[in-house]
Amino acid sequence: MAALASIPEFLRERLANVVLKVEEFATPEQLQSVNIATRWGLSGLYEGRPLSKESVWESGDLPPVISLFRQPLLREWIDTGVGLKELIRHVVIHEAGHHFGFSDDDMHQLERMAED
């Protein structure tokens, strides 16, 4: 996927075990986990333990997952006029940032690096 390929290699390598999946909409449980009331309000979600919180003392977790929700992404694309490729890259980078335990400022920097 082009969005992942745009992430700098030194970070992209650390995404090797992250599952990337596309669903039509988030499940009710996923929406509840981030306090979003409508299925149209969530375009992407990271589920897993961020790298910054991993421990050698904990094992047996399922692999982390980045989910993209197709219908909300398409609606956001139409509503905002942002290019679909750019929108998907933004969401993937944001969710990957959660995997790394990044702050919002860090995620914006990562997105700027991906644009270069």
Image: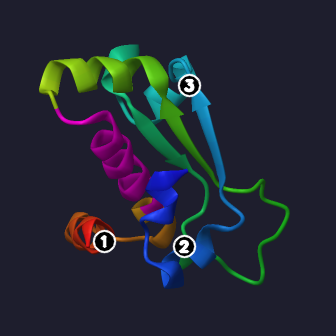
Looking at the rendering, the stretch of residues picked out in magenta corresponds to 82-96
Q: Which residue is mark 1?
A: 110
Residues tagged 3 and 2 counted as in contact (Cβ below 8 A): no
Residue 40 appears left or right of 17? left
User: Distance between the Cα atoms at labels 2 and 1?
Assistant: 11 Å
Q: Residue at x 34, y 16 (%)?
A: 40
Q: Which residue is mark 2?
A: 12
Amino acid type at mark 3: Glu
Residue 50 appears left or right of 43? right
Horizontal and vertical percent position of residue 83:
24, 36
Horizontal and vertical percent position of residue 85:
35, 42
**Which quadrant is the C terminus positioned in?**
bottom left
Q: Residue at x 78, y 59 (%)?
A: 61
Helix, strand or loop under label 3? helix
Q: Residue at x 50, y 35 (%)?
A: 68
**First reached walking from the N terminus: tag 3 or tag 2:** 2
Residue 111 appears left or right of 91? left
Rendered image quadrant of residue 98: bottom left
Helix, strand or loop under label 2? helix
Q: Nearer the viewer, residue 110 or 98?
A: 110
**First reached walking from the N terminus: tag 1 or tag 3:** 3
Q: Which residue is mark 3?
A: 29
- Rate crowding at label 3 as few (under 14), some (14 to 19) or many (20 or more) other CA atoms within 10 Å: few
Residue 54 appears left or right of 71? right
Helix, strand or loop under label 1? helix
